[in-house]
Amino acid sequence: MAIAMISVKLVLRVQSKKPSADQAVTWIEDHADEGSIIKSRVLLPSLFKLASCQDHTYPDDNSTFEIRNLRNLDYIDPDAFKDLPLLKYLGIFNTGLKAFPDVTKIYSSDVNFLLEIADNPFITSVPANAFHGLCNESLTLKLYNNGFTSIQSHAFNGTNLDAIYLHKNKYLEAINDDAFLGVHSGPTLL
């Protein structure tokens, strides 16, 4: 059985030091142990942080990608998720991210893309155009239990929204009146 491959641009660094060649992690197909933090058969030691770009590939098993339980992860390079037309699902859970991750270069061709960003207490805002370029078709957003205090103007610009879930964002005080300006369609559920 052939395994389709998707290219993802990632480089790792230990704490705040520059990455060296021996710190680059190769993607492992079917292994799991206590150091696993990214599903989709991608293995990363927990002391590493996502930093900037370098080509690697990971198996396209159901075209899903998850980052989970990595509190030391405070930065994802803007080009980390770039040109992933087969991606159907991206989940980012329980990290130390301080800014909303750039998902605008994914360009998924999936008909029903699902983005789930949850349990990230240091992400305080959903910026303008946060999802523009994510996908061309129907988009479901599950953005729950984060540290959001605001959703900016034009945050959902350029999307075909099916549903948005914003529950358990206990610090969310303001959704800009223009947050949905530029939406092509939807949401049918908010």
Image (tube, rainbow, N blue to C red):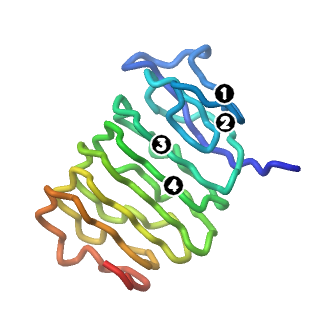
Question: Residue sitting at 40 percent across and 33 percent down?
Answer: 70
Amino acid type at circle 3 is Ile
Residues marked 3 and 2 touching at CB (< 8 Å): no
What's the distance in space between the residues labelled 3 and 4, CA to CA?
Answer: 8 Å
Question: Real-space Cα distance between discs 1 and 4?
Answer: 20 Å
* Residue under numbered circle 3: 67
Earlier sequence position, callout 2 versus callout 4: 2
- Circle 4 is placed at which residue position? 90
For the residue carrying disc 3, how many other residues have a C-alpha within 10 Å: few (<14), some (14-19), or many (20+)? many
Q: Residues within 10 Å of mark 4 (few under 14, many from 20)?
A: some
Which sits earlier in the primary sequence, circle 1 or circle 2?
Answer: 1
Residue 90 in the image, given as x and y percentages of width and height: 51, 55
Please, what is the three-letter code of the amino acid marked with disc 2?
A: His
Label at residue 26: 1
Q: Is residue 55 left or right of residue 121?
A: right
**Crowding near pointer 1: few (<14 within 10 Å), some, many (20+)?**
few
Rendering quarter of residue 167: bottom left
Disc 3 or disc 1, which is closer to the eye? 3
Q: CA distance from mark 2 to mark 4?
A: 17 Å
Q: Do the residues under discs 1 and 2 have CB atoms within 8 angstroms?
A: yes
Image marks 1 and 4: residues in contact by CB distance under 8 Å: no
Q: Which secondary structure, mark 1?
A: loop
In percent of the image, x 13 and y 56: which residue is there?
171
